[in-house]
Image (spheres, helix red, strand yellow):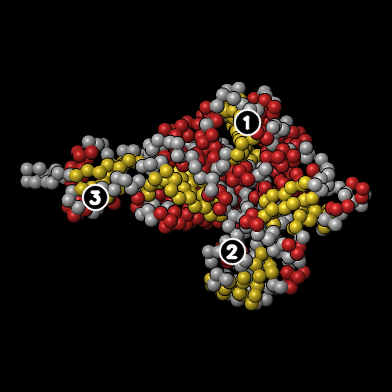
Amino acid sequence: MPIITFTPQNKEIEVENGTNLLKAADQAGLYIEGDCAGKGTCGKCRVRITEGEAGDPTKAEKKHLSDKELDEGWVLSCQKRIKQDLTVEVPAQKEAHLRKTTLAGGVEELKADPAIEKASVKLSRPSVEDQTADLERLLNHLERPDLSVELRELTNFPRMIRDNGYKVTATISGNRIISLEPGDTSEQLYGIAFDIGTTTIMGSLINLAEAEVIAVGATTNPQNIYGADVISRINYASEGKTELKQLQDKVIEAANQIIRDLLKQTRVARDRVYEITAVGNTTMSHLFMGINPTYLAPAPFIPAYSRALEVEASALGLEINPGGRVTFLPNIAGYVGSDTLGVVLATEMDQRKDNCAAIDIGTNGELVLVANGKLMACSTAAGPAFEGAQIKQGMRAAGGAVEAVSYENNRISVSTIDDAPARGICGSGLIDAAAALIDAGLIEASGRFINPEENPEAVPEHFKNRLKKGQGGWEFVLVPAEDAETGEDIVLNQGDLRELQLAKGAIYAGLMILLKEADISEKDLDEVLLAGAFGNYVRKESSLTIGLLPQLPPEKITAVGNAAGDGSRMALASKAMRERAFSLPEKINHLELSTRPDFQDIFVDALKFQ
């Protein structure tokens, strides 16, 4: 079998003949971005063959790679079938998830009230006169004879208490003792709250005794190799038990890596982490739990379950206390998951009396509206454009991504994350670039670039050398090749604008349906909340310019950070918050947009740039 050596990671793996390089890298534990699930349409999985034959380029490679790159050995890893030993250079992957970790919060104002409790006791010693069994002696001291105990905790219990002067700490979850520990460990009470995103997984380590976030970590969701969107992953999972297990293993291993990193940062012992809460969209919750999501994809979009699920961490292979519990908060509908419920919980939308909308912008756009005493939610298939997928030079929000573009004094200015040389365009940069070019008069309301050949007078002289004709039509050069890390122009092209129109049109149309159902107009909104890392970094003014958001004064639009993750943290730190979360699905009326005959008309109209 061929042997593949990946550099500079110096990882070597033996693979079956005919395996593609993308899967080989995955087997070697390397992450390569592959948003299109190996179809060759995104062009993101570039690697360079430095030893061995690259072979003839495929049609997809000719489309996405220049002649120079092909000559230098660059290939698309999803397209390259392995037939011989190869040495492959994998470009360093810039971290695309770190911004989300800066948005952690949500528990500081809560009173510590965890579902897990600890009781430290000093047991009386047995005697001939008092021959009470060790476990019954403990339960009598706790005054909780109803408690059950895990068998594994009893195996060493007799020796433990005798070696430690009969001092023991019991960790109790509901009516069960999940851990027995020598001495007094009552102050060591920790849990982890996860936000399982389609693109990014984030975890927060919380000191439950103080309701305090003490460390936050995140990683890219490695299920990305099977596609950037949930439909791709549902389709893969539906192929069989092996494929479903592969998807679950990916997300569980990513969660475990975050757990290891958090514990290493804080020197908290693994056995002192007793509980996990998690939120995510409905597909992610199914895949995390290893439940077949197949019937979420076709109408009528039925999930296997919607209620909160609680299981032992060990049943999922999560590396916390063996008796630790995992609670995935309830979903609302097939495409409105517990992440949206987390947003409602964190922003207290269920308790507001005014008219307020919340929008979580991502591959799926989840929207919530409270108005006239009603609480409603829906989901729109915005597509992955806001994550940088399906954009010619799109990328996630990592170093070198164009994140801000402005137009002022006849000049287009561009900023990149970390002020690094430009490598591509992330979601906020995409919105900014479109808005800036609309302001500059270079993009029509229809979404088309001004054609300088048909209407040369409409293009100012200072922009004529930046508006060029590319393979797919007109494109605007945001960063010239000499200033870009890639050595090629960073451009916004006509196809990118079309993807942006589809994405922003879907979200705006979804909100208009909610407003219509509530019998109010967008002007009646008192506030719009932008949830998620994307919402925190996108400029309100640019979103208004392109028609992504309702036409309101910017001061009525508020970024609320990672509210879904905040909801997960709140449910972990407080029993009251968790009970409130459990009750929310009954209070939220879900609107299925696919059954609305008026959605398509509103969507088509929403494609226009304002």
Q: Give the percent coordinates (x, y) of residue 280.
A: 53, 44
Three-letter code, disc 1: Glu
- Hey, which residue is sitting farthest left in the picture? 129
| Residue 62, placed above or below residue 364 | below
Question: Disc 3 vs disc 2: which is toward the camera?
Answer: 3
Q: Residue at x 43, y 48 (%)?
A: 214
Query: The residue under label 2 is which amino acid type?
Result: Lys
User: Going 38% across and 38% down the picture, which residue do you hit?
Assistant: 112
What whole-number distance in Å separates the C-alpha atoms at marks 3 and 1? 52 Å
> In which quadrant is the C terminus drawn?
top right
Q: Is residue 595 above or below residue 293?
A: above
Instruction: Identify which residue is drawn at 24% across, 36% down.
Output: 144
Tell me if I can see residue 180 in this picture: no
- Quadrant assignment, res 589: top right
Q: Amino acid at mark 3?
A: Gly
Q: Secondary structure at mark 1?
A: strand
Q: CA separation, marks 2 and 1? A: 46 Å
Q: Which residue is mark 3?
A: 183
Q: Secondary structure at mark 3?
A: loop
**Label 2 belongs to which residue?**
23
Instruction: State the separation of the CA atoms marked 3 and 2.
Output: 49 Å
Evaluate if marks 3 and 1 touch, with contact meaning CB atoms under 8 Å apart.
Answer: no
- Circle 2 SS class: helix
Q: At 74% from the left edge and 47% from the top edge, which residue is drawn?
A: 406
Would you say 147 lies left or right of 448 here?
Answer: left
Q: Give the residue pinned by disc 1.
A: 527
Q: Position of residue 566 (x, y in %)?
A: 50, 41
- 581 relative position to 18: left or right: left
Comparing labels 2 and 1, the label whose residue is closer to the camera: 1
- Residue 208 falls left or right of residue 491: left
The mark tally for this picture is 3
Residue 38 quadrant: bottom right
